[in-house]
Image (cartoon, helix red, strand yellow):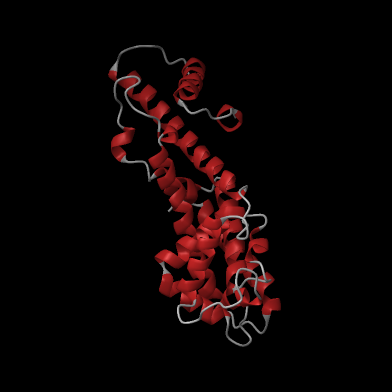
Amino acid sequence: TVLNTTPLSRDTRLLVDKVASQIFTVKKLDDSSSIGQEVIRCNVKLSLEMIIFVRRVIERSASLRRIPVSQTTNLKQQEILDTVWKRLKPDMRRVGGLLTEEWGEIGFQGRDPSTDFRGMGFLALRHLDFFTRTRTEAARGILLDFSRPGCYIPFAVTGVNITALVVELLQARSKAMDLRIMTTVDATERLPEEKGSRTCPADDEDTVSAGLSVLDHVYCDLFIAFGELWVSSGPKSIMDFPPIFHTFSCNTRAQYASTR
């Protein structure tokens, strides 16, 4: 409870030491220098560090969600959206400017794509950018599948739904998600060293960024998996989206709830 409610500072070592001390007291672990006791104390602290690290990733993802998307006022976001368009439609030049119905070609629902990111904010745009950049051919293939008569659903808006599912898995602290994030911590960073000589994973920006990138990859995996399910389900219209996505979400939650 303390780990989940105590605000995280820039230096989480104090929180680790505080909670570890409480555990040692409850479990009656003394300050004996015996190898057995020392190993137990070390493992407890390392476990606490990993739990706090996942919390840091959760907080960082939440901060990205709180950043609004506005291509008309944010040049960087405008450039990201333009780049996403070019990756998905390399042979089609958008001629209507920033605000145009042409955005519907890649699955936005109005003239301003910014409005479709409400709720998931910049995190959803980050995911869409990562997907189209690292798995360009897969993204183009899914866009094509989603654009077929009878199979149509908006590609970009579906991506926002995928981001929401990723966030749900993260906030639920599903075992598979936690483990994937924890494995981004380099093994050498987990080794016991002299007190104060090692930075906690949650306090290292590169390590936190690596943990956050797990969400990008999970997003890609889920988008591809849903694309395959959508096509294989033989939808008759866009009205089939809610039940099919509901089934997909339930199966994904069950899958991530168990360790693999």
As drawn, is 139 to the left or to the right of 160? left
Would you say residue 45 is visible in this rendering? yes
* Position above or below: 21 against 175: above
Q: Nearer the viewer, residue 73 or 2?
A: 73
Q: Quadrant of residue 31?
A: top left
Q: Give me the residue at 58% from left, 29% from top.
A: 7
Q: Nearer the viewer, residue 237 or 126?
A: 126
Picture coordinates of residue 85, whole percent (x, y)? 51, 71
Would you say residue 254 is visible in this rendering? no
Q: Nearer the viewer, residue 229 or 215?
A: 215
Q: Give me the residue at 48% from left, 67% from top.
A: 83
As drawn, is 91 to the left or to the right of 199? right
Q: Give me the residue at 55% from left, 61% from top.
A: 78
Q: Nearer the viewer, residue 116 or 90?
A: 90
- Total marks shown come to 0
Q: Give me the residue at 43% from left, 45% from top.
A: 209
